[in-house]
Image: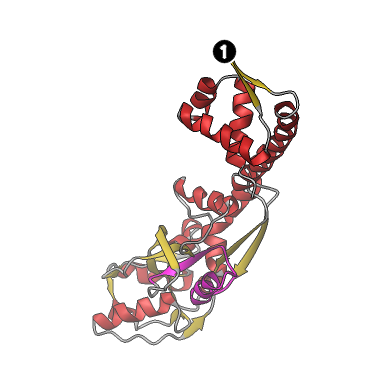
Amino acid sequence: MVNLDLYRVFYTVARCGSLTKAAEELYISQPAVSQAIKQLEMQLGTPLFNRMRKGMELTAQGGELVYRDVEKALKLLTGVEGRLADLRETATGTLRIGASASIFQYILSGKIVEYRNLYPQVKIELISEVSPKIVEYLKTDRCDVGFVNLPIPDEEGIQLGEPIQILHDVFVVGKAYAHICERGELSLGDIQEFPLLLMKEHTVARTSFENFCRSFGVKISPSVEVDSWDFMKRLVTHGMGVGCIPREYALRRLADGLLYELNVQPTLPLRSIGMAIPKDSNMPFATRAFIGLFGKGKVIDAE
């Protein structure tokens, strides 16, 4: 078996012309350098150096011939190592991002555009699914990074980062029910007087809402169940009743006067969006570069 370390020592001694200088460059002792040269000479069956008073000189029949071949080989290896290092520090290949449609729209769209501008050579694959599915895809190597509604159960093989966005669930109405705002502070019980729009059952938002109401002894039955925040905003804007939605997802309509936020006490508990990655994965630079974008401040995008 070829011992590359011996050839590297040989090449360095030949180039430096001195055991001492070669030892300094290689950060090893001079006896170790001398021993490596002797070992290589024994393996090749020929002297490689003439030990001169002024230093080390390549032998004409052995050393000079070996030097030319070793120099070519080491340059090739250096090129390979350099190209591999470039791959580790260059965003290439495919980045698979998993999230729900709402998270893509309200949380990730700006970051995805920013990433594409920085790394146009990376193919971006968007996997739109509910949070439990995204967790499963992360565990089965069908997704590189996922964004999920928190909390989620502890999952073996999944690592959760810090929340990237806090969500404030609020009650909103359109102009048809804007007069409710004049009543000032409302209770959870007061909301039962009006048609209520909620997300479908078994979603994180719906479960969080029901658990909170139950803790106050209030059971609320929705008049309408929807499967998207955009559809809820549209229905509420057109007078279908009271909607419960993250304020961050309704900022523009609130600012434009198309929706009105009710003062309901106690306020609903905060929720959050978290980033998830496979635990102990060999993360390529393309993935690390995308994750790194979330250390630059506010994440939420305008509607």
Residue at (38% x, 73% y) in the render: 154
| Residue 16 image position (x, y, % from top left) | 60, 20
Question: Does 289 appear in magenta?
Answer: no
Position of 198 with respect to 290 (left or right) is left
| Residue 222 image position (x, y, % from top left) | 42, 85
Residue at (56% x, 63% y) in the render: 144
Position of 122 with respect to 141 (left or right) is right
Residue at (41% x, 79% y) in the render: 206
Which one is nearer the viewer's eye here, 232 or 71?
Answer: 71
Question: Does 140 appear in magenta?
Answer: yes
Q: Which residue is mark 1?
A: 53
Tell me which amino acid carries mark 1. Arg
Q: How many numbered markers are drawn?
A: 1
| Residue 14 image position (x, y, % from top left) | 64, 24
Res. 38 image quadrant: top right
Does dot 1 land on a helix, a strand or a loop?
Answer: loop
Position of 200 with respect to 120 (left or right) is left
Count residues near mark 1 (Cα–Cα under 10 Å), then give few for <14, some for 14-19, many for 20+: few
Which one is nearer the viewer's eye here, 207 or 117?
Answer: 117
| Residue 180 image position (x, y, % from top left) | 36, 72
The answer to whether one can see residue 176 in this image is yes
Q: Residue furthest top?
A: 54
Residue 98, compared with residue 293, is above or below; it is below
Residue 200, compared with residue 253, is above or below; it is below
The part of the chain drawn in magenta is 128-151
